Image: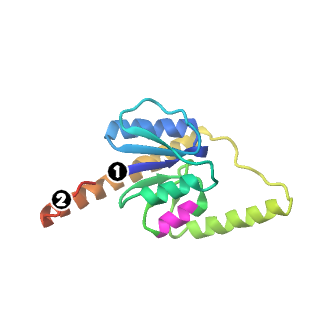
Amino acid sequence: MRIWVDADSCPRRIREIVCRASDRKGIEAVFVANRPIPLPNCRTVRMERVGAGQDDADRYIVEHIEEGDLIITRDIPLAALLVEKSFSVLNDRGDLYTRENVRERLSVRNFMADLREAGLPQDTPGQLSEKDIRTFANTFDRELVKAMRAAEARRAERERSGTGSAD
């Protein structure tokens, strides 16, 4: 299993939390962006730089994720696609995207885009608060533990069935 981060707009504090958890748990974290992103020096963290196209990072993630991976993105269309494929996806404020909520969020996002295109002013989300960071850390930790347990169960099942490929 891996942790994938759509890193173009991922705040520094969130990147630090992901890197610490990745290093502590020994799970690879892959940060995907179209520009260099400052990351802490960790043995389990790598940066994948993609082209400058609007959806290049999203496309790279979709092409490289595997069963059981955990994805962090604030890109709601990407989240919707991944949730439909049964991936665990959360945003940088700790909101877990589910089949129950992602369609509504996508509709709201599209509505807001229509308002922007019509020239109506928009409120933008404020700066990341300490509460947002705590919420992210708690949700991320819970989903990471869940993903690790599922990966271990898949590994044990493969060993029982004699098909032992690695997670």
Q: Is residue 91 above or below residue 83?
A: above
Q: Residues within 10 Å of mark 2 (few under 14, many from 20)?
A: few
Q: In screen coordinates, is 112 left or right of 17?
A: right
Q: Residue at x 52, y 40 (%)?
A: 14
Residue farthest to the right? 119
Asked which secondary structure carries label 1, the reply is helix
Residue farthest to the top? 41
**Spot occupied by residue 140 in the image (x, y as percentages of width and height):** 45, 48
Q: Which residues are magenta?
A: 78-84
Is residue 22 at all visible to an observer of this figure?
yes
The C terminus appears in which quarter of the rendering?
bottom left
Q: What residue is pinned by disc 2?
A: 164
**Spot occupied by residue 50 in the image (x, y as percentages of width and height):** 54, 47
Q: What residue is pinned by disc 1?
A: 145
Q: Residue at x 57, y 54 (%)?
A: 56
Q: Residue at x 62, y 48 (%)?
A: 52
